[in-house]
Image (cartoon, rainbow, N blue to C red):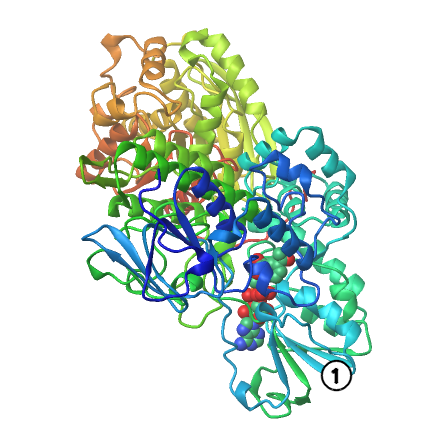
């Protein structure tokens, strides 16, 4: 039952003396608000929806400028909560116009009888948390106040238009319009001289339409944006077929996808494709007319790697040059200041071709900034343009604007939201804010929102909020509030996610850069719709992790903590591995495990091209050993790094760490020689250790033949390979050479003790387990030999060893022995640098191009190796001749 009576209905709530008492108040009657109202009612809550506009629609109510359409295919940009609603409405176009979307939202409002609980023409003027009664008290500019238990902002991300920030707007004697507040009766532009300022999505949609009508159109562009042809028309038969063929599966795939549209995850990387293959993919995407498609389906590295991205950006710039006849205009329209997709790209109809019209002029504000607006028009640094109409397509104070600018929100202890967010929005899950009990946001900052299909994200957010409110009520709780710990953890996770994509490299409304003085930082959640959904579910499954729940007749509940401590891509990788439900490696037998790893490695992204990769044979401790040599593309000779692969002395070979060797070869500009040392159980201790030493000596002796710089070599290794590298340094010191300039130890095995905290904390769940390590040790080394420094280098003498860089990962059983080794080296006077990688697991750095957040760590490792070799840390770019395929 609703906890309170609705004192006055929306339709008869005129008196400001009365207070409307409801369970939940919602602000905003767009996609989010309408679904919220429906769900709240169904869950048995009394609710009122407050809306400033005269009708439903939200952004689609206000944005009526010519050419306004959605830019996610409309069959995807629809509610999916009710299959009957889905079949009751047919979209007429691939990208519906604003009037059609508005009709749809009106249809939804009528179908679920929503209008009776909506107070139109009602603006909230303040919202204050009343701790004594544990309710939000809402003041409005029209009619009754509202007292509610739950206050839910469905105010949208792009609903507070940004002021134009240009001097003299008030002096202009002609007509002024904002795309975000377009007059309902339309605007007659025929025969007029029109100026449009701004070339974001709104400007790019409006400009071709205005050009057709106006006598003269002058476009004032500060920053060019990437735009792609929509190829609008009927909804494409293949997509429609997929939806209608299995509606539930189609919607489910969208919910689990990264962007909220059911396209598969692309796995092919750009360097695996030839020029011709890349062009073919690009042309298909250009013809498809679909933003999400081109952003996700070309090659896997396009959104995460500047090189992979540049290939797409170049191809789009080529298209612009092909369409726009005047080369100077084409150059001005070509974006160079941000990676494709880092700023919101646009979907257009004839945008670039519009600049071929005789009545259209582009003014490049980077060359001649606007000085002022005067009575008759716009003056730049070099010219004056007399116009009759100015259209501002200058965008929005995005994501936080609607929450902060619209009305003061005061939380617990009188805290103002504007103060709490002074340095940028702080939220937990983008849904809640510490210090603001029972306040919820739909698509708030910190949620995937604008980086996703809004329809899918809105439904997920609404469902989550209403489900939790119902659960709270059923348990007897009346308040729910995020903890500071959970919120800080979410901020960290957001920052980690932001490292994954290229959004941080562009000045955009995503980062607050479009509003002067606004705090900067990537505001939407960049970790993807599917992962976000699973995190929200995990919060619930972990007993409302990070929330404090209180109620009048029940003990407070607070399971405090951070919901994601892993790096986002590590979380994904571990999730995929868990889904595969693999038997433990140690149950497969040595050969079975080797076969499995070989198969497993076939599925990983191919390593990047280097100058040359060659195979050879060297002399180990007891006979020939295979090696693989990775040579940089730059002219030699190069310093040599002797590399030892991971695999617990049992698994792997000279090519099993191929992506890592390639990556490090590129980053260091050094030769990597990966040694195929002998493995247990066929060759037990000390075979691997002695092979490591012998191989290093052989490589040092043959440096010139291998194309290496004469003089000291370097050693590096991962896991058991790190163990061999460390041991090799000790043996080289004790046996009179070779000279080693430095050692890179990545998650090394350094000791035979299994009782350090990391062995216990990370015993399971992070791929390398305590059980697996026991098995490796048993196969390689009998207990009697385990304290020998050739397998437990931590127990050896450490003075006089080459400088070291030791990498350890937070979620690795081997973490603490790696740290112990680094500390012991330092204590013995060896120069040591440590990288303690937060949120990473044992394989983070070798899963190149899968764990993208490993890149900064590998950069540090490469810089250290270069310093050890006496080189400047940074490698100059411009590799000259790369191996076949991808160059
Ligand atoms: O706003 P924007 P928008 N002087 O911020 C320029 C969604 N949307 O309304 O880049 C001169 O993108 C500014 O220049 P700069 C979509 O998510 C969707 O177009 O800051 N110029 C920029 O060119 C979109 O991303 C659809 O240098 C000034 C432009 O104005 C988001 O809404 C349709 C200026 C603003 O572009 C916002 O799009 C429309 C100044 N003082 C919008 N101030 C669909 O199709 C700003 N600019 C669903």
Give the image location of residue 370, x and y in percent.
58, 83
Q: Nearer the viewer, residue 702 or 212?
A: 212
Q: Relative to 702, does residue 439 appear above or below in the rendering? A: below
Asked which quadrant contains residue 858, the reply is: top left
Asked which quadrant contains residue 49, the reply is: bottom left
Q: Nearer the viewer, residue 181 or 168?
A: 181
Q: Name which residue lies at 27% across and 46% down.
A: 481
Give the image location of residue 145, x and y in percent.
34, 62
> Which quarter of the image is occupied by the C terminus?
top right
Q: Relative to 41, does residue 67 appear above or below in the rendering? A: below
Give the image location of residue 381, x and y in percent.
59, 88
Q: Is mark 1 within 8 Å of ligand 1?
A: no
> Which quarter of the image is occupied by the N terminus?
top left
Q: Nearer the viewer, residue 819 or 360?
A: 360
Mark 1 is surrounded, within 10 Å at the Cα level, by few (under 14), some (14 to 19) or many (20 or more) other residues, namely: some
Q: Which residue is mark 1?
A: 192
Residue 705 shows in this picture: no
Element type at mark 1 = loop
Tag count in the figure? 1
Q: Name which residue lies at 45% across and 43% down.
A: 462
Q: Relative to 353, does residue 261 appear above or below in the rendering? A: above
Q: Name which residue lies at 28% across and 32% down.
A: 475
Give the image location of residue 220, x and y in percent.
64, 77
Asked which quadrant contains residue 41, the reply is: top left
Q: Quadrant of ligand 1?
A: bottom right
């Amino acid at each position: 039952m609703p906890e309170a009576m609705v004192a006055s209905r929306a339709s008869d709530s005129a008196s400001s003396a009365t207070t409307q008492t409801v369970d939940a108040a919602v602000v905003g009657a767009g996609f989010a608000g309408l679904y919220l109202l429906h769900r709240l009612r169904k869950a048995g809550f009394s609710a009122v929806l407050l809306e400033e506009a005269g009708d439903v629609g939200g952004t689609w109510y206000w944005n009526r400028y010519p050419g306004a359409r959605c830019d996610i295919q409309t069959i995807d940009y629809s509610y999916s909560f009710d299959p009957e609603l889905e079949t009751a409405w047919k979209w007429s176009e691939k990208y519906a116009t604003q009037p059609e979307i508005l009709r749809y939202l009106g249809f939804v409002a009528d179908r679920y009888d929503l209008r009776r609980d909506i107070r139109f023409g009602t603006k909230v003027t303040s919202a204050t948390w009343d701790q004594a009664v544990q309710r939000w008290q809402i003041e409005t500019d029209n009619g009754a106040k509202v007292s509610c238990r739950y206050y839910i902002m469905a105010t949208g991300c792009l609903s507070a238009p940004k002021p134009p920030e240009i001097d003299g707007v008030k002096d202009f004697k002609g007509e002024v319009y904002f795309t975000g507040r377009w007059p309902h009766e339309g605007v007659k532009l025929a025969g007029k001289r029109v100026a449009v300022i701004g070339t974001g999505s709104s400007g790019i949609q409006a400009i071709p339409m205005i050009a057709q009508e106006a006598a003269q159109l002058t476009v004032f562009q500060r920053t060019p944006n990437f735009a792609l042809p929509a190829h609008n028309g009927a909804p494409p038969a293949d997509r429609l077929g997929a939806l209608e063929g299995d509606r539930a599966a189609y919607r489910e795939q969208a919910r689990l996808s990264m962007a909220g549209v059911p396209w598969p995850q692309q796995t092919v990387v750009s360097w695996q494709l030839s020029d011709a293959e890349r062009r073919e993919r690009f042309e298909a995407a250009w013809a498809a007319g679909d933003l999400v498609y081109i952003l996700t389906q070309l090659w896997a590295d396009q959104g995460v790697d500047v090189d992979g991205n540049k290939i797409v950006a170049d191809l789009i710039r080529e298209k612009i040059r092909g369409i726009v006849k005047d080369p100077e205009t084409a150059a001005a329209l070509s974006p160079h200041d941000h990676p494709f997709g880092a700023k919101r790209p646009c979907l257009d109809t004839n945008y670039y071709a519009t600049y071929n019209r005789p009545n259209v002029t582009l003014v490049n504000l980077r060359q001649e900034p606007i000085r002022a607006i005067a009575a008759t028009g716009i003056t730049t640094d070099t010219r004056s343009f007399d116009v009759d109409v100015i259209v501002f397509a200058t965008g929005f104070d995005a994501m936080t604007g609607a929450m902060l600018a619209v009305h003061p929100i005061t939380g617990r202890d009188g805290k103002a939201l504007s103060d709490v967010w002074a340095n940028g929005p702080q939220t937990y899950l983008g849904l809640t804010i510490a210090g603001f009990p029972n306040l919820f946001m739909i698509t708030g900052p910190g949620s995937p929102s604008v980086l996703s299909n809004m329809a899918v994200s809105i439904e997920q957010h609404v469902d989550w909020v209403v489900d939790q409110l119902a659960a709270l009520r059923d348990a007897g709780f009346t308040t729910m509030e995020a903890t500071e710990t959970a919120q800080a953890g979410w901020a960290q996770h957001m920052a980690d996610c932001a490292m994954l994509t290229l959004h941080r490299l562009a000045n955009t409304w995503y980062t607050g850069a479009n509003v002067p003085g606004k705090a900067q930082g990537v505001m939407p959640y960049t970790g993807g719709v599917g992962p976000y959904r699973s995190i929200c579910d995990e919060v619930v499954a972990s007993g409302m992790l990070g929330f404090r729940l209180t109620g009048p007749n029940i003990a407070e509940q607070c399971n405090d903590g951070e919901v994601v401590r892993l790096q986002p891509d590590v979380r994904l990788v571990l999730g995929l591995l868990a889904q595969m439900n693999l038997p433990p490696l140690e149950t497969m037998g040595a050969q079975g495990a080797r076969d499995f790893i070989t198969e497993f490695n076939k599925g990983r992204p191919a390593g990047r091209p280097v100058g040359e990769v060659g195979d050879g044979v060297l002399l180990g401790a007891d006979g020939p050993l295979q090696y693989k040599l990775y040579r940089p593309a730059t002219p030699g000779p190069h310093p040599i790094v002797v590399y030892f692969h991971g695999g617990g002395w049992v698994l792997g070979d000279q090519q099993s760490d191929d992506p890592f060797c390639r990556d490090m070869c590129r980053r260091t500009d050094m030769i990597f020689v990966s040694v195929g040392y002998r493995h247990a159980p066929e060759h037990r201790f000390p075979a691997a250790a002695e092979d490591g030493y012998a191989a290093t000596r052989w490589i040092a002796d043959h440096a010139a033949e291998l194309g290496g710089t004469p003089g000291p070599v370097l050693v590096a290794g991962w896991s058991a390979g790190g163990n061999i590298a460390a041991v090799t340094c000790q043996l080289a010191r004790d046996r009179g050479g070779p000279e080693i300039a430095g050692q890179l130890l990545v998650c090394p095995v350094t000791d035979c003790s299994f009782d350090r905290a990391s062995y216990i904390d990370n015993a399971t769940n992070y791929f390398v387990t305590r059980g697996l390590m026991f098995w490796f040790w048993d196969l390689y080394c009998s207990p009697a030999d385990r304290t020998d420094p050739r397998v437990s280098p931590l127990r050896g003498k450490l003075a006089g060893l080459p400088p070291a860089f030791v990498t350890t990962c937070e979620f690795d059983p081997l973490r603490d022995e790696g740290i112990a080794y680094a500390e012991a080296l330092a204590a013995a006077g060896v120069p040591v640098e440590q990288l303690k990688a937060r949120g990473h697991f044992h394989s983070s750095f070798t899963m190149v191009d899968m764990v993208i957040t490993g890149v900064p760590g590998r950069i540090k490792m490469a810089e250290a190796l270069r310093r050890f070799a006496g080189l400047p840390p940074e490698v100059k770019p411009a590799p000259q001749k790369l191996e076949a395929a991808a160059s």
